[in-house]
Amino acid sequence: MTPGERALVARLCADRAGLAVDPEKDYLIESRLGPVARREGFGSVAELLQAVRDREEERLVWAVVEAMTLPETAFFRDPAVFALLRDQVLPKLARRRDGEPIRVWSAACGSGQEIYSLAMMLADAPIAGARVELFASDVSERLLEKAQSGLYTQFEVQRGLSARLLVRHFEKHEEAFVLSPRIRQMVRWRRVNLMEDLARLGQFDVVLCRHVLGSLTGPARGRVLAGLAAAVREGGCLVLGADDAVDPAGFSPVAGLPGVYAASADARAAA
């Protein structure tokens, strides 16, 4: 790939999704875009990018951007976070909301392992007095399609999923495993670009956006964080990745759990 082609990819990713792509990582860019070029009928990545330049076609632009957003994910990633939600956050919210639905949003759900982990957890151990509504979104249409299908490879289910949960909630499907309709139907899906105005989505009691901010450009990181923070209702919490190293205004960190922040009236008034 030429420096100009790599720079084009980096610019498109930053402009459309706030994604920081190092134009010097030619192997990464080539390996991510090679399958896109083949799928779209181009003989090479160079031909794909030339078409992006010439046609200015949104579908092709987003095919390039989405290919560079592939996340690293697993079922029940960071188990302490799920234990906190199950044992402390959701029971406390159930008492506080007094019968109102508790809204939980996985804001960059990728291929769905995080939100399905929550769904399985709630199905196996319902929170007394809680009505929990699960929402999931991603900027990638292809990842959303995969997530909604509930179809995972042997490698994917082995990452974080116990044998008990696999037997309980999945069925063998050829060389893969498919999640039960009961669990899939617990989640509502929507394509959302976190760079856009998030106010239209309403507010949530728990917002999860883990291991995402570090992949964004500096300006995008601030913008996305502000949008996520504004989407959390008072008394709720914002769950980021332990390695995101941010301190959202209007939130106080939960002791012993890096990346987990509680929204409080006092903290927000001081922000």
Image (cartoon, rainbow, N blue to C red):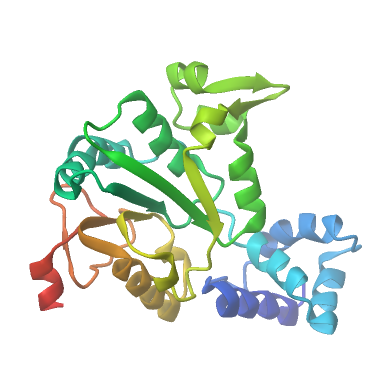
Pinpoint residue 199: horizontal percent, then vertical percent.
39, 72
What residue is shown at x 26% (from left), y 38% (from top)?
130
Q: Give the quadrant of the C terminus.
A: bottom left
Residue 76 appears in view: no
Q: Is residue 132 left or right of residue 31?
A: left
What residue is shown at x 44% (from left), y 31% (from top)?
160
Camera-side residue of 45 and 113: 113
Camera-side residue of 78 and 235: 235
Pinpoint residue 142: horizontal percent, then vertical percent.
67, 53
From what the image shows, is residue 18 above or below residue 35? below
Pinpoint residue 178: horizontal percent, then vertical percent.
62, 28
Which residue in the rendered view is the most extreme toward the left?
Answer: 266
Q: Is residue 87 left or right of residue 122?
A: left
From what the image shows, is residue 195 above or below residue 210? below
Q: Could you say which quadrant of the image residue 176 lies in?
A: top right
What residue is shown at x 41% (from left), y 46% (from top)?
134
Q: Give the quadrant of the N terminus.
A: bottom right
Q: Could you say which quadrant of the image residue 44 lies in?
A: bottom right
What residue is shown at x 13% (from left), y 63% (from top)?
264
Pinpoint residue 57: horizontal percent, then vertical percent.
79, 77
Residue 39 appears in view: yes
Camera-side residue of 97 and 45: 97
